[in-house]
Amino acid sequence: MQFSKYMSEWLYGENGYYTKYKSIGKSGDFYTAVSTSKFFGGTVAKHIIALVDEGFLQKDAVICEIGAHHGYFLADICEFLYTLRPELLASFQFVIIEKFDDLQKYQKEYFIESFGDAVALTHYKSLIELTCNNAFFIANEIFDAFPCELYFKGKSARVENHEVFFDSNDEWVSKKAKRYHKDRGEIAVGYEAFAKAMAGAAKKFEFMSFDYGEMQARPDFSLRIYTKHEVHPFFEEGLNRAKLFGKSDITYDVTFLHVKDAYEEAGVEFVEFKAQMVALVNMGILELLEMLKEHVDEKIYKQELEKVKMLIMPNFLGERFKMIRFRKK
């Protein structure tokens, strides 16, 4: 089978890794910015308020997270909206795009536990189901979870019994490889359809996403497997892929130029691309910390400060992760 189909089965098949709820953080297979600090969502909430003040977002806009997993990110955004501009919690419409019923259940339960009936959460299985006038879309580590094809010197990969063979011809993959100057590596599948679906979901919107990668393609394979905080290159000698299949995360570095191309082809304007640390500082994460310092004791402040440092320090998540932003006006 094509590698993209193999990866799709690994992550989203009947017993795929993302079809059931998984712990993220210390007890899971990896950390994310969301599992590191509530101030990640808080900073996005501050940015959303700035968009309202700017006039880009209406007070009845849809605030939509895509690929929410447990729902922590959107919940953190709601929590900080309540603190910073409480009237928006009642006027905004909160939406999660989640195709798996099991994850929808966890998200609904978490929102009820967190907010009772103060926040009305709506689910859609796909962006295609959503139609609105004005929206803010947010996603964390979504583009690295799209299936990909593997390419090596003119040939695409197929998989048999978890073994990879580069002996297939695929014109679309070869064209993308040429566009991104790759003679080997991953070619993501689905960015174009995703961008088109979002462009059709809202008449006017901003989309912000955080992920790891670079604007230009890496010159080699980055495909890797995360299991219990251990990282294994996909082509590691002796790696038992059959044992890890569906039970661990498989991912790769995002080529953000491919994301940019997909959105511009869908008629959506590229706004900016920045390291996560720069984006979060520009959106006001340090100002939020100063507000916290005025209202809590020193011990709690220092605890939160250390978590925020993990988000913005170059040697942790600050430089490796990037923010990309788009607008449809």
Image: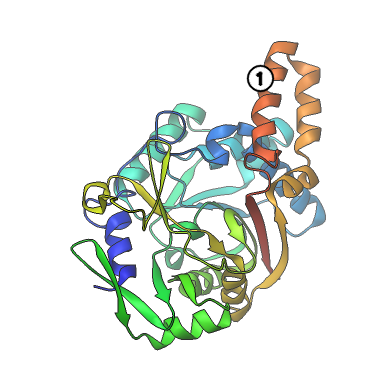
Which amino acid is tagged 1?
Gln
Q: Position of residue 216 (x, y in %)?
A: 63, 69
Q: Residue at x 34, y 86 (%)?
A: 169
Q: Which image quadrant is residue 146 in?
A: bottom left
- Mark 1: few/some/many CA within 10 Å (<14, 14-19, 20+): few
**With 254 as the anchor, is 23 left or right in this view?**
left
Report x, y in % for residue 160: 20, 68
Please name whichever residue, 12 or 245, is drawn nearer the observer in this view of the structure.
245
Q: How is the image coloured?
A: rainbow
Location of residue 124 with respect to 39 vertically, above or below: below
Residue 152 in picture, x, y percent from top left: 42, 76
Q: Give whichever of 195, 231 is nearer the camera.
A: 231
Between 206 and 170, the residue placed more toward the observer is 170
Q: How many marks?
A: 1
Closest to the observer: 237 or 321? 237
Element type at mark 1: helix
Tell me which residue sits at (81%, 27%) in the image: 290
Q: Quadrant location of the N terminus?
A: bottom left
Toward the left, the furthest residue is 161
**Residue 180 quadrant:** bottom right
Q: Quadrant of the C terminus?
A: bottom right
| Residue behind mark 1 | 303
Q: Is residue 34 visible?
A: yes
Q: Identify which residue is drawn at 46% across, 52% down.
A: 67
